[in-house]
Image (cartoon, rainbow, N blue to C red):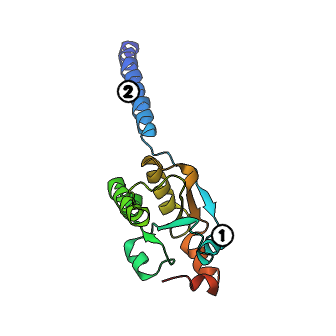
Amino acid sequence: MIKNKALKFIPVLIVLSLLLVACTSANESKEAVSNPMQYVTAEALKDSIVSESNEYIILDVRKAEDYSTSHIVGSYGADQDAANKEGDDATGIANLKKALKEATGSEVGNPGEKYALVCYSGKSYAQKATDLMIQMGISAEQIYTLEGGMKAWTEAGDDYKDLLE
């Protein structure tokens, strides 16, 4: 009799196990995929600014308040805080489009342009902006992240601090 009760629970356990595996697999497939990033050094970006070569269009993806406080000369604010912290990609894309329109005349930039993203440390905000720009149709080959972010820029010396406004 105990054996019969145990046999009745086996199908229930199998169904529960399958449901657990199915739910876990579905959640894993919904996770965002981060695109690989390529970097530009502070020195290379500074040289581009000083020589007025316009090699890079600089997009500052830090919070708007931090951009207002201080930013690299010639950069455009494209706040990615809502996208990075709250998953609000629509706001992140809108801010990128606004900055790109101001910088290039087009909400999706121009083919052949190179974009340098400035965030706090060259990591999460720039990664989010990279992912969104690629989603917008901009080639990954056009997108660079300032290595070490604004932290590295401000610690690089007076020549770099002089290029802040």
Q: Position of residue 95 (x, y in %)?
A: 36, 62
Q: Determine the secondary structure under disc 1.
A: helix
In this rendering, the answer to whether 132 lies above or below 68 is above
Type of the residue with mark 1? Ala
Is residue 6 shown left or right of residue 156? left
Q: Residue at x 44, y 47 (%)?
A: 135
Between 10 and 88, the one lying in front of the other is 88
Residue at position x 52%, y 49% in the image: 139
Return the x and y of residue 96 as percentages of the image width and height.
40, 60
Whether 161 is drawn above or below 98: the answer is below
Could you say which disc has been placed on residue 53 in the image? none
On the image, the x and y values in percent for residue 38 come to 61, 56
Which quarter of the picture shows residue 89? bottom left
Q: Which residue is mark 1?
A: 44
Measured as percent of width and height from the top left, residue 21 is found at 44, 30
Circle 2 residue: 16
Q: Earlier in the sequence, mark 1 or mark 2?
A: 2
Q: Is residue 147 above or below residue 140?
A: below
Q: Which mark lies nearer to you, 1 or 2?
A: 1
User: Is 15 located above or below residue 56 in the figure?
Assistant: above
The kind of residue on which mark 2 rests is: Leu
User: From mark 1 to mark 2, how far is it between C-alphas?
Assistant: 57 Å
